[in-house]
Amino acid sequence: MKKVRFLLLAAMVAMFTGCQKEVVEQELDNNKPTPTGDTRIIIEGEGMIGPATRSSDGKVEFEGGYATGAGLYNKDAQPEVAAHPDAGYEVNYFYGGPENELHRYDYAQSGSSTFTVPLGGQDHKFRCGFKEKKRDLTVNAGIGGSVSPSGTNSYRVEKPISITANPNNGYKFAGWTVTQGDVTIENPGSSATTTTLHNSHSTITANFVKQHSGNYIRGYLSGWRHAGAIFTFTSTYTTTKDLYVNIESQGDYEMEVDGRFEVYPYYDDLGGQTLRLVAGQKEWKVEYLPGIDSGARITSIQWQIVAKEDSDDNYKYIIEANVGREEN
């Protein structure tokens, strides 16, 4: 009777131990790709998100991407093993092979992240890792201003980067330009905008142009000279180029005829006369002769100054239109 009890107890212990072993083996198998053969490809590496995330199609999840191709294969199979970075990431390392040649396939050597692997009956192990994809951005300032940030810095791709252009006194912002790379700028015409890196190191430049100060020119009749008149012109700043103004007039003049003075009208200067204002001055006195007899004297004049705006590298010249009627 004791012998029977011992045999029963031994049988129960054996069954319990067998069940435990089966559960452990089943748990281990759950952490492996679904077997389809007898030759194995294993993919592992830094940032791997736990074996439990492996799917039946041989996909292994990592921080920043995933790899495909893990599993059991027939010994003559030629499966494809690949690394797939997420947006904003890139392959850091990806290599593998049989035990006697662990770098037979290497992203660092080939630049490829997809390999066709003839197994030849040998197990293969691959290691994979991803990193944030960063590129250098150089931000330059043209003459007449500064930028922020300035110089060369490293940034993650596909993430907007704030940029600002600040013109110096006397200059204004004239737009951003891409001088190298595939970087894009959200609003190239805005001094404060964002730029985004993609695949290559890139350079952008903020452009500035000199902002012309308004240099106002005003003229008026300031005196008489027999058959003509004197016009005075004043400028806000000393000019840096020659300027030209046009005076149109009509009026009356007197002449001595047979011992007495006669007054005559004139209309022959309605087409105007162009006067030159020489560069390097702030005030000019110019003589205006409407074309009457040199012995005559203007008695009255109705005049107007007409001129187009002009500019140079320093100023925008604004020659004010002016009219008047004077008696002499």
Image: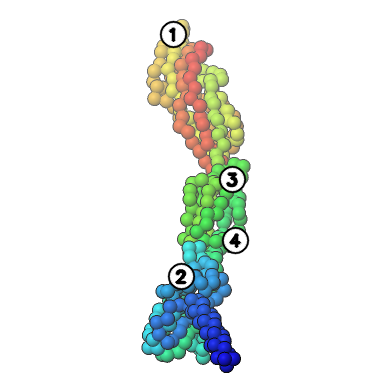
Q: Which numbered mark, 1 or 3, is in the foreground of this view? A: 3
Q: Nearer the viewer, residue 321 or 162?
A: 162
Q: Secondary structure at mark 2?
A: strand
- Which of pointers 4 and 1 lies earlier in the amino acid sequence? 4
Residue at the farthest top position: 260
Q: Position of residue 119 (x, y in %)?
A: 42, 87
Q: Which numbered mark, 4 or 1, is in the foreground of this view? A: 4
- Which of pointers 2 and 1 lies earlier in the amino acid sequence? 2
Q: Position of residue 52 (x, y in %)?
A: 51, 72
Q: Amino acid at mark 2?
A: His
Q: Which mark is residue 277?
A: none
Q: Secondary structure at mark 3?
A: strand
**In the rendered image, which residue does mark 1 sit on?**
262
Q: Which numbered mark, 4 or 3, is in the foreground of this view? A: 4
**In the rendered image, which residue does mark 4 sit on?**
153
Residue ID at (52%, 57%) = 159
